[in-house]
Image (cartoon, rainbow, N blue to C red):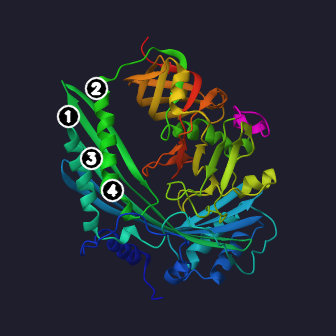
Amino acid sequence: MKKITRRSFLKTTAQAAAVTIAAPVVLPEGWYSFASPAPTGYFENEFDISDSLCQKILAKALAKGGDYADLYFEHTISNYIMLEDGKVNRAYSDVALGAGIRTVKGDQVGYGFTQEMTEESMLNAAGTAATIANAEATKPASKFRWIVTKSYYPTDFKIVSAPLESKLPIVQSVNDKCFSLSSLITKVNATFHDQQKRIMVVTSDGAKAEDLLPRNYISAFVVAEKDGKREQAGWNFGGRRELAAYTDAAVADVAKKAVDSAVVLFDAVQPPAGEMPVVLGPGLTGVLLHEAIGHGMEADFNRKKISTFATMIGKKVAEPFVTIVDSGTIPNLTGSINFDDEGTPSQKTVLVEKGILKGYLHDKISAKHYKVKPTGNGRRQSYQHYVVPRMRNTYMEAGPASPEDVIKGAKNGIYVEDVSNGQVKIGEGDFAFYVSQGRLIEDGKLTAPIKDINIMGNGPKMLANITMMGSDLEFFTGGGGACGKAGQAAPCSFGQPTCLVKSMTVGGRR
């Protein structure tokens, strides 16, 4: 490889990603095949990260006697195109390049990272990580084996390298469609974001894995005005997809959902306040499952006795028709991964099976503590962050009831379609969420739209109070959100069918 400076490399890759102007590419409708994972050898070819160098860095990380060490190499290119007031007023790229070195001693972690892919810088970072221990040196594996995984997203078509001209029409179309759908729309913000994240994980026990993770989305945020009143709403679509996924139909769907969500609020009312049945609609309301229940099933919170679920393994936590799963293997979803950031292949992990809590979401540290295998949930935001157990795509499986029967079962209450601005206490599971979209349920039927209310409750109690589960499981297919934990943001998704919670606190009108 011809040696270049990091500054020159970042400058070159950013220009190639964001400023390439060429003849527009013609992409067929539909999907590309992605049966194979990303080819290996990128970091060795581009940065001379050889096996011998990895062994040297790992030996430095274990020089003071850690139990385990790993290396995490990252090169990420992110592009953003933003349209406001009918014009593209912002377009830029970010490039992240670096390496993180972790040393583990018991359940303690030493961590160092560097933005320079030089032997000296990486050895210095490894020396920092090694200070967690104070014993005789531990030897890393003498050779590495490539981890073979399946692929759950495209790795052969690099969306960030597509010409800028092929992306500009997407945000323009979002803008035009939003304005065409309603004369009440006065402002549109449209965004197209695409990212390509290359990673390589090398571990002291001899594992080596490399991947290319795409992430992209289109979004629309609209403002509507009527009779002196103003409402706003937004929607996005994305995940780990190719450029071909952003068809006219996909753009039209994003625009329609954003516009409809804003316009319907002019007719919205406030429901009465108090305890009442709440029906959670399919798909997007799975964020409640993620925040109020899923975090409590991450193993570090249970290992530290923070979560309510810490003593509940093997016990009933929900009705027999409730099964909760976290999976990294659902094609194209934002939370899908071929392997986690410790090199553990992705899998489907059942957390609650027929109402019984079966297990937690593990990284290698918590798996060793509980004497189980890692579940592929060791994740991090970037090379600057250490691994913690994180969700991927968390969902409740479909139940036996029709959605219509679930709504009838509520009799009188509210139907929640979308929530935002949530607050959750992980230990107790107490939560409060703002309902941004929903409807009244009166005599078992959906009636007037609602707004300006909160729902409050406790995650474990909400889980126990689910009395009906619909057959209409949906996943949220947006790509713009991320989950926050330990000062890190990680992409994820969620889903659920329509379900009835027999009682929740609704903060409506007095």
- Rounded to the nearest angstrom, the CA distance separating label 2 from label 4 is 28 Å
Quarter of the figure with residue 238: bottom left
* Residue at numbered disc 2: 266
Residue assigned mark 4:
192
**Circle 3 residues within 10 Å: few <14, some 14–19, many ≥20:** many
- Mark 4: amino acid: Phe
Which residue: 22% across, 56% down?
A: 88
Which is closer to the viewer, label 3 or label 1? 1
Of labels 1 and 2, earlier in sequence is: 1
For residue 311: magenta?
yes
Q: Name the residue under label 1.
A: 184
Element at label 2 = helix
Depth check, mark 4 against mark 1: the one in front is 1
Inspect the image, locate mark 3, and give the three-letter code of the amino acid beneath it.
Answer: Asn
Q: In this view, does 28 lie above or below 249?
A: below
Earlier residue among tags 3 and 1: 1
Mark 4 and mark 1: Cα distance apart in space? 24 Å
Kind of residue at badge 2: Phe
Asked whether residue 232 appears in the rendered view, the answer is no
Decide: marks 1, 2 in contact (CB < 8 A)? Answer: yes
Residue behind mark 3? 189
Quote the CA–CA distance across marks 1 and 2. 10 Å
Q: What stretch is highlighted in magenta?
A: 305-320
Front in this rendered view, residue 382 or 324: 324
